Image: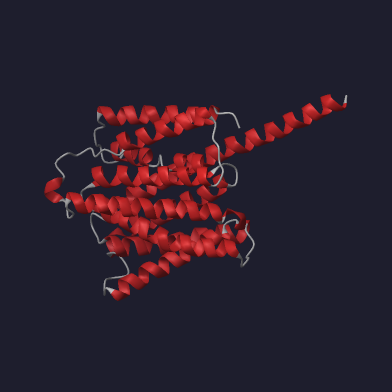
């Protein structure tokens, strides 16, 4: 009887872990959609204004819902988690700023896939270094997701070189730096997940201060033109929502899988470009969406 009870107890534990993993996957996918909407709006905004004031305004706006969520869901603490959040704010500011600059330069086909792949691969490697060992099916899903990100992120409007503000080499370097910054943010926030949303709020404030200091030092405007502020406002709201979702998903899953699912955000951006801007989807992009769906199914069905 004791053995039966013990096996039943282990079964209950596995069911609880499984439920937590599935909820983490669902939250991560919702967060990816939120990030995708935010990046879509950010990319639109940076085609009409400089990336720096757009990013600063989006960060400021994002502090508001994030502060409210932190007040209700987390208690204020001052420990090593806040130090991780502070570091994440600095590298995150660099990552998102460079991303918006690249997306607004007209070289989206170069910047988007490189940034997204870096933001996937580096956290997966970090997760392995931290001792995570995903199941074989999940590993296959991660590999397919990386391929999906590359295909999805291909630009829809081919003749973009004439209106680009960055050289090809400059676009590649911008994308690599952005990807490292975004990946660094994801990894550092994983280290700070024990502090709830409080380190995340600190990271957002630090990022805002860092970008504002850069604007002051370079004598550039702090705010975007008034006519595009509503767009940037919603960019900040969705970006903050995606970040909150990422932290909540980390509490229910692993860094490698959560970061991979988060990095599928270009799918949401692509679908918005199709239905809002009327852009046509290429065959490889449709294949990328199918691969993304397959990756999610594989990751979801992997044994915990």
The quadrant of the image that shows the C terminus is top right
At 55% from the left and 42% from the top, the residue drawn is 254
Residue 27 against residue 289 in the figure, above or below = below
| Residue 3 percent coordinates (x, y) | 83, 26
The residue lying at 16 percent from left, 52 percent from top is 167
Could you tell me which residue is drawn at 47 percent across and 66 percent down? 205
192 and 38: which is toward the camera? 192
242 relative to 266 in the view: left or right:
right
Single out the residue that lies furthest toward the left. Answer: 162
Coordinates of residue 172 in the picture (x, y in percent): 25, 49
Please, is residue 27 above or below residue 3 in the view? below
Q: Position of residue 32 (x, y in %)?
A: 44, 43
Q: Vertical placement of 42 versus 32: above or below?
A: below
Examine the image and state in which quarter residue 15 appears. top right
Residue appearing at x 58%, y 38% in the figure: 23
Vertical position of residue 188 compared to residue 80: above or below: above
Answer left or right for 81 relative to 125: right
- Between 182 and 69, the one lying in front of the other is 182
Q: Is residue 63 visible?
A: no
> Does residue 107 appear in the picture of this structure?
yes
Instruction: Count all numbered tags in the image, as a single digit.
Output: 0
Colour style of the rendered protein structure:
secondary structure
Quadrant in which the N terminus is drawn: top right
Percent x, y for residue 267?
37, 37
């Amino acid at each position: 009887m004791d053995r039966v009870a013990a096996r039943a107890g282990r079964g209950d534990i596995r069911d609880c872990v499984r439920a937590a993993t599935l909820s983490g996957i669902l939250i991560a996918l919702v967060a990816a959609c939120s990030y995708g909407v935010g990046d879509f709006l950010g990319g639109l905004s940076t085609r009409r204004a400089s990336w720096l004031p757009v990013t600063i305004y989006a960060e400021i706006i994002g502090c508001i819902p994030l502060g409210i969520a932190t007040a209700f869901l987390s208690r204020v603490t001052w420990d090593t988690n806040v130090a991780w959040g502070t570091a994440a704010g600095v590298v995150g500011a660099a990552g998102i700023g460079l991303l918006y600059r690249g997306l607004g330069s007209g070289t989206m086909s170069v910047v988007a896939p490189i940034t997204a792949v870096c933001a996937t691969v580096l956290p997966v490697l970090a997760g392995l270094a931290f001792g995570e060992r995903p199941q074989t099916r999940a590993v296959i899903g991660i590999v397919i997701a990386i391929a999906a990100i590359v295909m999805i992120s291909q630009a829809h409007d081919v003749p973009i070189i004439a209106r680009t503000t960055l050289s090809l080499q400059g676009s590649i370097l911008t994308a690599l730096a952005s990807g490292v910054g975004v990946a660094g943010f994801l990894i550092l926030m994983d280290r700070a997940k024990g502090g709830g949303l409080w380190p995340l709020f600190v990271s957002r404030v630090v990022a805002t201060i860092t970008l504002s200091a850069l604007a002051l030092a370079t004598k550039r405007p702090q705010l975007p033109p008034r006519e595009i502020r509503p767009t940037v406002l919603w960019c900040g709201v969705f970006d903050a929502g995606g970040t909150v979702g990422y932290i909540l998903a980390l509490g229910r899953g692993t860094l490698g899988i959560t970061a991979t699912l988060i990095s599928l955000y270009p799918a949401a951006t692509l679908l918005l470009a199709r239905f809002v801007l009327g852009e046509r989807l290429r065959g490889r992009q449709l294949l990328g969406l199918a691969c993304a769906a397959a990756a999610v199914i594989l990751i979801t069905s992997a044994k915990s």
